[in-house]
Amino acid sequence: MKELPLSKAYQFIEPGPVVLVATSDHGQPNLMAMSYHMVIADGDKPLIGCMLGPWDQSFKTLLSTGECVLAVPTVDLASKVVGIGNCSGTDTDKFKSFGLTSVTAEKVNAPLVAECLVNLECRIADDGLIDKYNLIILEVVKAWINPDREECRLIHHNGNGTFTVDGETMDLRDKMVRWSSYVQR
């Protein structure tokens, strides 16, 4: 074994796919890329914890409106996702600049992203950890999937500018005997 710097530990505990956070400030839609999120609770009242920095326009908008959409892009959108992360919504219309389509959501004022595989309409459920950790707990209030989307591979940020793409799927459902309620056929 070789010692790993603590500053690199997070690169091996990647929480999930890169998502786009869509917000709307007085009718002006915005997007940001985010890879720091985690499932807090599943079931009929899903909760997702996410970390945003107070320097981001989306952070300010999310706090002021209390809602957003988490849109899950696929690998074919990877370059756009990185581009979205490299500019600010204060001076860039990211939907227009990156050729993405804003779609009206049903339960929140933030837009869905038509090109993404999944869109989760969210509202802030708990903001008690913002000051200490920049951690916001979101409740998913409506979920959408595009079943006609041919590309379904997600991208995962490795924390160092590289990304991993979903690949081969291993089917171990038959071995998951203690979790039968979670195993879907």
Image (tube, rainbow, N blue to C red):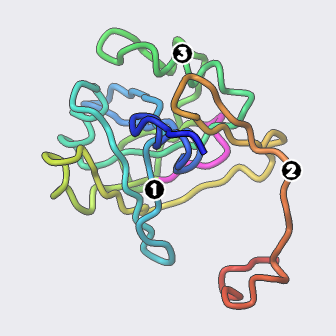
In whole angstroms, how far apart are the C-alphas of marks 2 and 1? Answer: 22 Å
Packing grade of label 1 (10 A; few <14, some 14-19, many >=20) is some
Under mark 1, the amino acid is Met
Say which residue label 3 marks.
83
Say which residue label 2 marks.
168
Q: Earlier in the sequence, mark 3 or mark 2?
A: 3
Under mark 2, the amino acid is Glu
Packing grade of label 2 (10 A; few <14, some 14-19, many >=20) is few
Seen from the viewer's position, the closer of residues 12 and 129 is 12
* Residue at the image point whose x is 82% and y is 77% from the top: 185
Magenta range: 114-120
Look at the picture and state if 185 lies above or below 18. Answer: below
Where's residue 118, x and y in %?
62, 49
Q: Which mark is residue 175?
A: none
Q: Earlier in the sequence, mark 2 or mark 1?
A: 1
Say which residue label 1 marks.
38
* Residue at the image point whose x is 54% and y is 46% from the top: 14
* Residue at the image point whose x is 35% and y is 44% from the top: 109
Q: Is residue 185 highlighted in magenta? A: no
Look at the picture and state if 1 lies above or below 161. Answer: below
* Residue at the image point whose x is 62% and y is 39% from the top: 156
Q: Nearer the viewer, mark 3 or mark 1?
A: 1
Where's residue 157, x and y in %?
57, 34
Quarter that holds the N terminus: top right
Under mark 3, the amino acid is Gly
In whole angstroms, how far apart are the C-alphas of marks 3 and 2? Answer: 27 Å
Tell me: 21 left or right of 100.
Answer: left
